Image (cartoon, rainbow, N blue to C red):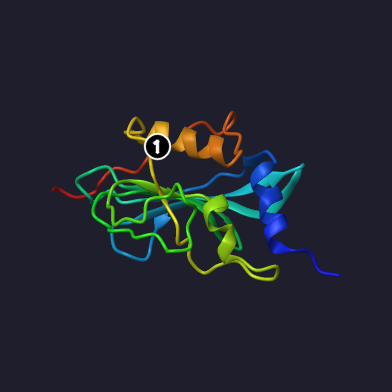
Amino acid sequence: MSTDIRVMVDRVIAVEKKPVGVATWIDEHREGDKRLRYPLLIEGEVSDATLTIIAYPWHRALRFRLVLSYTRAIWRVDYTDDEVHVNSFDKPDDVLLGPFSDPHYHAWQDNRRFASAAMLPDRLENARLLDANLKTFDNAFRWFCGQTTIDITELGVPSLPTTDRLL
């Protein structure tokens, strides 16, 4: 009998996780973008879950993504102000339909409905606006880790890479 992937993800989010290893910023697909990825330790073992930070040091305004993945993205913060998002019609009643382009987050509980027992959704369709007081990377990172039960006591808050070109 196979395990329901939704139940596994519920457990991954609920249980305490710790980033492990030494991660370094690497180039992302688009020129200038950077990615930092940590495997996550769950109950003393390296799991299939990862914490990824995507940075955009060439962008003039603060811009980043925080992603908790378990084979696919299951929770994400999109700290951007120039990407329009519209939620699906299959959304929780307290979620705005949109469109909006403010920083926002895609919580598992708002997107669980798109998963089946055997497969996670390709995309996290529903998002909520990020609280307006989360204006810095440090605050948003701590908040994200709190929401997803990632213990960063040992890791601390990583520094975003700085630009390597004149703007």
Which quarter of the picture shows residue 15?
Answer: top right
Q: Determine if residue 158 is in view.
A: no
Q: Position of residue 47 (x, y in %)?
A: 70, 53
Residue placed at 49% from the left, 39% from the top? 144
Is 136 above or below relative to 6?
A: above
Along the line of sight, the residue nearer the viewer: 27 or 71: 71
Q: Quadrant of residue 84?
A: bottom left
Q: Residue furthest left?
A: 167
Which quarter of the picture shows residue 159? Answer: top left
What is the total number of numbered labels drawn onto the structure image? 1
Q: Is residue 77 left or right of residue 111?
A: left
Q: Is residue 4 above or below residue 141?
A: below
Check the image and report above or below for 42 versus 74: above
Q: Amino acid at mark 1?
A: Ser
Whole-percent x and y of residue 131? 37, 36
| Residue at which label 1 appears | 159
Q: Is label 1 in a helix, a strand or a loop?
A: loop
Q: Which residue corresponds to the image point at 67% horizontal and 43% vertical from the top-left? A: 14
Report the front residue among 155 and 7: 7
Q: Residues within 10 Å of mark 1 (few under 14, many from 20)?
A: few
| Drawn side of residue 145 relative to residue 56, left or right | right
Q: Does residue 46 appear to the left or right of 153 in the view shown?
A: right
Quarter of the figure with the N terminus: bottom right
x then y, percent, for residue 142: 48, 33
Residue depicted at x 52% and y 53% = 110
Farthest front residue? 93
Residue 99 shows in the view: yes
